[in-house]
Image (cartoon, helix red, strand yellow):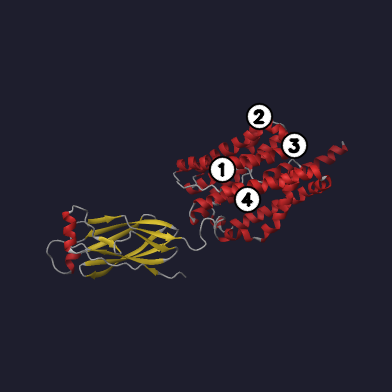
Amino acid sequence: MKTALVLSCLLLIVRAEDLEKADRSQSPVRYLRIGDGSSQEFEFPQNTRGVIVISSGYRSSGGRKGRESLKQTVRVRSLDPEVISILNVSDSGRVGSASSYVIGIRSGSPGTAPLLIQLLDLDRDSEPVLIEERSDYSIRVAAAVGDDPGARLLGSGGLSHFSENPVLFALLPLIFVNKCAFGCKVELEVLLGLLRRPVPLLLGVLGQFLIMPLYAYALSRLAGLPDALSLGLVITCSAPGGGGGYLYSLLLGGDVTLAISMTLISTVVAAAAMPLSSALYGWLLGVHAALHVPFVKILGTLLFIAIPISLGVLVKLRLPAVTDVLLALIRPFSFVLIVGGIFMAYQMGSSILADVRPPIVAAGVTVPVVGLLAGLGLARLAGLPLPQRKTVSIEVGVQNSLLALAVMQLSFRRADADYVSQAPFIVALSSTSEMLLLVLAHVARRRLCLPSASSA
């Protein structure tokens, strides 16, 4: 349990001659003080109860004697309740000619909360009269040790231990080998053809960064989602294609070279498109958050895709025997990674998804489906061949939800970040589950069709 902290504040007694000097200089008379007046911002630790002491040097006029002539009270309100909340206000009596008031507070999220302090005169038969109002005092709540944005990149609870997850360490070698194997599937002629005719690449950018964010915004309004959840859904749908896109393209008979190229291009474009999309829809939703794009994570994603795939291309050119082994490992490794991805996503988000509501679940489930259909429709309109149609559809429908998660964890306070992070977790779980069902249906269809074709 946190130890209560009391801010030691010196009570300032306002002398009569000081008030007269203030009147002569025509400067505003100040009756309320916290501390000795040398500072107007006070630091307070996170998640702690404590008190501040406010002193008042105001004297009622009217000539009445004793305490009855000093019927005053102080009202205090925090202008940012998430940072500082006011628990109670109590009159602690008088010190000389000054009255003092003890304000009980509780600190919350890191930040700075201005205080609205009002001194009211109750020495009248009518309504309380405002004597003075101040909002220039503030309390800064310092983050707890280890609670900086970088340390909580993946959130709180189970997320904070993501890097220590043994499943991750078990999957990393498989991921690296699998990406090398995908490098063996890259066709240089296809790659050169994409450079000459980049229509599929442009369709992917159009679907990922224009159609999907617009759909997320329209869906959130239609479903009546809270503004914060709506912005989380928009940011998720503004993310680039995920690394699983070319995996699904391989398993579903798509164009692997195109899939890898689209993932790389969309990840680069995301560095500019995600802030623009989020700023636009954040303004429409009335949610103003300073968006922190994790450029280091984007660069890491690019390198983690490009390096093993480039290594695979070199293996294909120089070591044909190793190429055959890697190609034989793609499919079993891919299924293991899909199942492991579902398990890790659920384990990471279990605490966040504990209080999830049905509307955001329903909205998140539709995102991969709509993305697949939108990409397929664009590819059909462009007249692309079937393998490229499949790939464009998959790349638009499968988002890099972990990148969206990193954006939200860096851009919002902890409680808000966990709340808006419901969207990427639900989209990630829905996307992986729905794509796994498509892969199983595709495999079953091939097995059922091949015997009938051979018998014919």
| Residue linked to disc 3 | 188
Q: Which sits earlier in the primary sequence, circle 1 or circle 4? A: 1
Rendered image: mark on residue 271: 1
Rendered image: mark on residue 429: 4
Q: Can residue 125 be seen in this snapshot?
A: no
In the picture as drawn, the residue positioned furthest to the left comes out as 63
Q: Which sits earlier in the primary sequence, circle 2 or circle 4? A: 2
Q: Can residue 153 be seen in this snapshot?
A: yes
Whole-angstrom CA distance, mark 4 to mark 3, is 34 Å
Task: Tell me if label 1 and label 3 are in contact, CB under 8 Å.
Answer: no
Q: Disc 1 vs disc 2: which is toward the camera?
A: 1
Q: Which sits earlier in the primary sequence, circle 4 or circle 3? A: 3
Q: Secondary structure at mark 2?
A: loop
Measuring from the top left, give residue 100's x and y in whole percent: 27, 67
Few, some or many residues within 10 Å of mark 2 (<14, 14–19, 20+): few
Q: What's the residue type where badge 2 is placed?
A: Ala
Q: What's the residue type where badge 4 is placed?
A: Leu
Q: What's the residue type where badge 3 is placed?
A: Leu
